[in-house]
């Protein structure tokens, strides 16, 4: 199964660390974050990969060129950021008409990706994607999801003061070929996947909850936690 890794962000909340290094390459216990993603996905039988670049793109290019994944990774540079949905739509042909992953690669994630893919294949009828979720200690800072008894999303609560629970959207998705086709036909003008796409499919999004480490390393505090 192919995967698009969104890795073009500037990491402004992590400055000054990201003044000289792109967020996707910040070291976690001595290893670039993107390297951890590519290793774990490859071990789960996922690939090849498409990675978008923007901020300090030459560093990402140099990393891939000297990595074990250079034959599996295609880089696409965005002079102007297209947005999370915009990047997906611009590269729909990469999936070759099959299901595929869309990953916000600025998180530190040690989930079981084989189990995630298996959950997608076993999703309830009518579901067009599978979303990875995790439990958060700070629900007001995350997008919290409400589920029905099948594990299907029936509501979103995006960074509200008192959300109904702590099950958060991990921004790691497996998208069905059906959904990808619709993105190209009906949603070709959208830019942001979370804000403009997800709400259209409430009742059609299956979920997989990981109990493994899942951290947004976007702040100095979270980054320190990941390294500890």
Image (cartoon, helix red, strand yellow):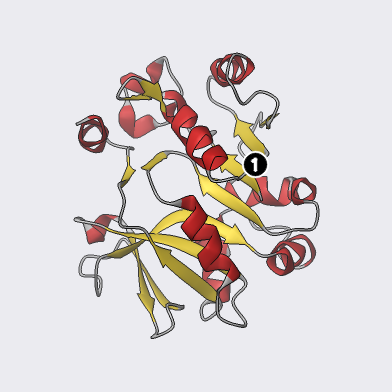
Where in the figure is residue 217, as x and y percent of width and height? 32, 37
Camera-nearest residue between 87 and 51: 51
Where in the figure is residue 69, as x and y percent of width and height? 62, 26
Camera-nearest residue between 1 and 85: 1
Q: Residue at x 40, y 50 (%)?
A: 111
Does 33 sit above or below residue 100?
above
Can the viewer see residue 40?
yes
Camera-nearest residue between 117 and 186: 117
Neighbourhood count class around disc 1 (C-alpha, 10 Å): few under 14, some 14–19, many 20 upward = some
Q: Residue at x 48, y 30 (%)?
A: 34
Where in the figure is residue 222, as x and y percent of width and height? 24, 38
Q: Residue at x 66, y 23 (%)?
A: 70
- The residue furthest bottom is 149
* Kind of element beneath mark 1: loop
Does 77 sit above or below residue 202?
above
Where in the figure is residue 65, as x and y percent of width and height? 63, 16
Q: Is residue 62 found left or right of 161 in the rendered image? A: right
Give the mark count: 1
What residue sits right under mark 1 in the picture?
47
Q: Give the position of the C terminus as an image quadrant.
A: top left
Locate residue 141: give its quadrant.
bottom left
Can the viewer see residue 10?
no
Does 37 sit above or below residue 112?
above
Q: Is residue 88 found left or right of 198 in the rendered image? A: right
């Amino acid at each position: 199964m192919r995967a698009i890794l969104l890795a073009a962000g500037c990491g402004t909340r992590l400055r000054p660390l990201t003044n000289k290094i792109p967020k996707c390459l910040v070291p976690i216990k001595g290893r670039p974050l993107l390297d951890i993603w590519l290793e774990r996905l490859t071990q789960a039988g996922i690939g090849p990969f498409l990675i978008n670049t923007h901020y300090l793109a030459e560093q990402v290019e140099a990393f891939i060129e000297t990595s074990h994944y250079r034959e599996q990774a295609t880089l696409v540079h965005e002079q102007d950021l297209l947005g999370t949905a915009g990047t997906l739509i611009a590269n729909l042909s990469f999936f070759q008409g099959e299901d595929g992953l869309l990953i916000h690669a600025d998180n530190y994630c040690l989930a079981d990706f084989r189990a995630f893919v298996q959950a997608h294949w076993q999703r309830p009828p009518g579901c067009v994607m599978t979303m990875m979720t995790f439990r958060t200690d700070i629900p007001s800072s995350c997008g919290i999801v409400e589920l029905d008894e099948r594990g299907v999303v029936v509501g979103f609560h995006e960074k509200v003061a008192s959300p109904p629970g702590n099950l958060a959207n991990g921004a790691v998705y497996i998208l069905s070929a059906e959904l990808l086709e619709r993105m190209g036909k009906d949603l070709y003008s959208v830019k942001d996947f979370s804000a403009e796409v997800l709400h259209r499919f409430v009742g059609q999004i299956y979920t997989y909850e990981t109990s493994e480490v899942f951290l947004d390393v976007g702040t100095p505090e979270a980054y320190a936690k990941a390294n500890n």
